Image (cartoon, grey):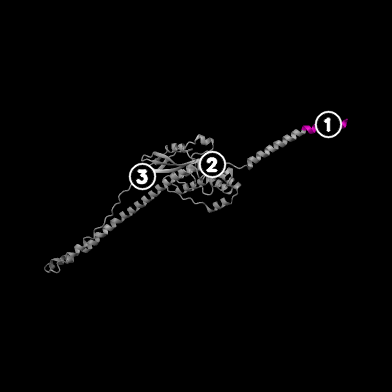
């Protein structure tokens, strides 16, 4: 009887302990899963809320010439040798230190792009690049406004690798081309002004030297004194006044002909872009596509005569594209200082 009581007690004790052991196992498993998710999951990107992005290496201030940024070869070598995990770690550090797009080879944008080079389907890097795109585009626009053409072009090329069909790139390239033409024109004007100043500085010396040469030829006392004595000789009379006649043209210096002023000539520049409204029907179907439009930029900078040249799929995004284009505004094209109309073609991408 005692033996049976002991067995029942032991069985009862085991029965009471089993749920506790099972609960402990579940808790440990949950803690382990949480630790795995926190430490080993594919890291995303958290962009610190800063507005606007800080001035970075290679940027300049308005009115200062562009600074050419050259990547450090040692930094690029290091970038190529890092593993995916190391690249994620470097990217997080770069974000915390606000190195979004600069310096070259040591910024968050390039770290995430390098991850995609190694693993093209890495969703963590893809998500990070989508979130980083807007901030990087803003940094590129700041470089354009500061006339840092080289660094702006570098950032735009990196963004093209991240999302080649993003319509923001079309706007950035348009602004970059316009700024580049302005810089080239101002450089040419400065060179012409410098050349004109050099020629003006050389003119007084040439003018002063010419009369001195003429005076030495005509001012001959001996010749002037012998002219009356030789008046009786018919053969010598023409020879005496020959010296002044020969020397007379010497002081004449051809004055430079001033070039006729030429007004400014440039293409139309987009100054206000309104993004298209995604059609609800396409949104429900999760449908993407593009529309090629052509329109006229009037002499006042407004858009007229907008029409669709091509689209894929047809007639799905046409109206949204035309509505957006008609609300754009431009600085009109200029020919010899006068505003003129210009015809422009643009491809508008519709992506989810």
Distance from disc 2 to disc 3, alpha carbons, whole Å, reads 37 Å
x%, y% of residue 230? 13, 68
Q: Residue at x 56, y 42 (%)?
A: 128
Q: Quadrant of the N terminus?
A: top right
x%, y% of residue 43? 60, 42
Q: Secondary structure at mark 3?
A: strand
What numbered label is drawn on residue 334? Answer: 3
Marks 3 & 1, CB-CB < 8 Å contact = no
Check if residue 174 falls in the magenta segment.
Answer: no
Question: Closest to the observer: 191 or 63?
Answer: 191
Q: In the rendered structure, which disc, 2 or 3, sits on the residue that comes first in sequence?
A: 2
Near mark 2 (Cα within 10 A), the count class, few <14, some 14-19 or many ≥20, is few
**Tag 2 residue:** 130
Check if residue 9 falls in the magenta segment.
Answer: yes
* Range covered by the magenta-colored residues: 1-16
Q: Secondary structure at mark 1?
A: helix
């Amino acid at each position: 009887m005692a033996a049976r009581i002991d067995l029942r007690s032991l069985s009862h004790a085991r029965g009471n302990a089993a749920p506790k052991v099972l609960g402990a196992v579940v808790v440990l498993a949950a803690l382990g899963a949480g630790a795995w998710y926190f430490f080993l999951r594919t890291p995303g990107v958290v962009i610190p809320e800063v507005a606007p992005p800080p001035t970075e290496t290679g940027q300049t201030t308005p009115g200062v010439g562009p600074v050419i940024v050259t990547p450090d070869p040692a930094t690029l070598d290091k970038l190529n040798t890092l593993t995916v995990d190391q690249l994620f770690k470097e990217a997080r550090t770069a974000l915390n230190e606000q190195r979004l797009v600069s310096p070259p080879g040591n910024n968050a944008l390039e770290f995430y792009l390098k991850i995609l080079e190694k693993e093209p389907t890495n969703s963590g890097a893809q998500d990070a690049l989508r979130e980083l795109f807007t901030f990087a585009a803003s940094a590129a626009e700041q470089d354009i406004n500061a006339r840092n053409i080289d660094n702006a072009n570098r950032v735009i090329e990196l963004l093209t690798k991240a999302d080649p069909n993003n319509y923001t790139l079309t706007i950035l390239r348009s602004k970059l081309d316009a700024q580049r033409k302005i810089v080239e024109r101002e450089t040419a004007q400065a060179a012409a002004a410098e050349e004109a100043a050099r020629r003006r500085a050389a003119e007084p010396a040439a003018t002063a030297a010419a009369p001195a040469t003429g005076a030495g030829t005509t001012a001959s006392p001996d010749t002037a004194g012998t002219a009356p004595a030789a008046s009786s000789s018919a053969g010598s009379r023409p020879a005496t006044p020959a010296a002044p006649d020969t020397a007379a043209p010497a002081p004449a210096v051809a004055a430079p002909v001033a070039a006729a002023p030429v007004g400014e000539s440039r293409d139309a520049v987009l100054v206000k872009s309104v993004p298209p409204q995604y059609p609800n029907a396409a949104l429900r179907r999760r449908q993407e596509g593009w529309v090629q439009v052509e329109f006229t930029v009037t002499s006042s900078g407004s858009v007229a005569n907008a029409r669709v040249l091509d689209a894929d799929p047809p007639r799905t995004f046409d109206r949204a594209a035309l509505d957006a284009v008609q609300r754009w505004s431009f600085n009109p094209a200029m020919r010899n200082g006068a505003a003129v109309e210009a015809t422009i073609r643009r491809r508008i991408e519709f992506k989810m």
